[in-house]
Amino acid sequence: MTDTPLAPATALQHPRGIERVVVGERTSDGAGVKLTRVISGPALQRRLDPFLMLDAFGSDEAADYIAGFPDHPHRGFETVTYMIAGRMRHRDSAGHEGLLTNGSVQWMTAGRGLVHSELPEQEEGRMEGFQLWLNLPASDKLCEPWYRDIATEEMPEWTAPGVRVRVVAGATHGVQGAVQRERTAPVYLDVHLEPGATFEQPLPAGHNALVYVYRGGVAIGGEAATEAGRMAILRNDPQADGVRLQAGEAPARALLIAGAPLNEPIAQYGPFVMNTREELFQAVEDFNAGRFR
């Protein structure tokens, strides 16, 4: 779904700069799916609160993805899976089922507990996408599970000369994203830039923000371009009013992700993310006892 182009917002006065650039760790998960883990570990989780994990996967080799992610549990957070290319089938213990295809998103709130699987529905060709883990506040960690598939034709978009932005969450230039969350107020934008094009996004100064470049190179706040496969953590300057992205001589694509920190303790044991060790013990006990929905 493409919205009518709107006039750009007032130019930023104090765009954020780059605090540091992170190269993800090549690893595997599920039944051997090869991926790059861009956000992981306590240090980055604290710095990029409320985001817990960001995985990027992409391969033309079926052996890298064909085994998928068989049944596994989650509790205490949300998963956002964005498929750039390929077909992936989701099923979970609450009876939800959906098919992710090119350009679609699956937003799942695990809440008090779900068991689900994500399995490829292709035996050849390219499989590419991202999975983001978004933490839930303590008050919502045991909420009822929730699930939504967003088809590519349903994705809100904003366009301007040389710029196309797919709005997964939050808003840009008056276009509301597919999903909104009050407490963490996430912004999740897939920004497509033609050579030399510039995009500006206002952001609250208190939001933690990152840019993950996955095509070409993107200059952020006028600094040297960040190359594809790199994540730039943006500075939290009190006077900052947003983010400015500019492509170089080639087209570029990047994820701009930002959110309000929860500032709560994070206790994690694999697919369970709670606030205390005692809550983790309870999560494991509930899962082993078959109490997940």
Image (cartoon, helix red, strand yellow):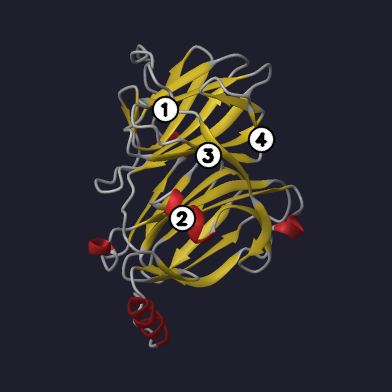
Q: Is residue 226 left or right of residue 285?
A: right
Q: Quadrant of residue 248?
A: top right
Q: Are marks 3 and 2 in contact (CB under 8 Å)?
A: no
Q: Is residue 280 left or right of residue 23?
A: left
Of the 4 image quadrants, the one containing the C terminus is bottom left
Cα gap from disc 4 to disc 1, whole angstroms: 23 Å
Q: Which residue is mark 3?
A: 103
Q: Is residue 108 left or right of residue 226?
A: left
Cα gap from disc 4 to disc 2, whole angstroms: 22 Å
Numbered label attached to residue 45: 2
Residue type at numbered disc 3:
Gly
Cα gap from disc 1 to disc 3, whole angstroms: 12 Å
Question: Helix or strand or loop: what does disc 4 sit on?
Answer: loop
| The residue positioned farthest toward the front in the image shown | 238
Question: Helix or strand or loop: what does disc 1 sit on?
Answer: strand
Cα gap from disc 3 to disc 4, whole angstroms: 19 Å
Relative to 203, is 289 above or below? below
Relative to 157, is 184 above or below? below
Q: Which residue is mark 1?
A: 157
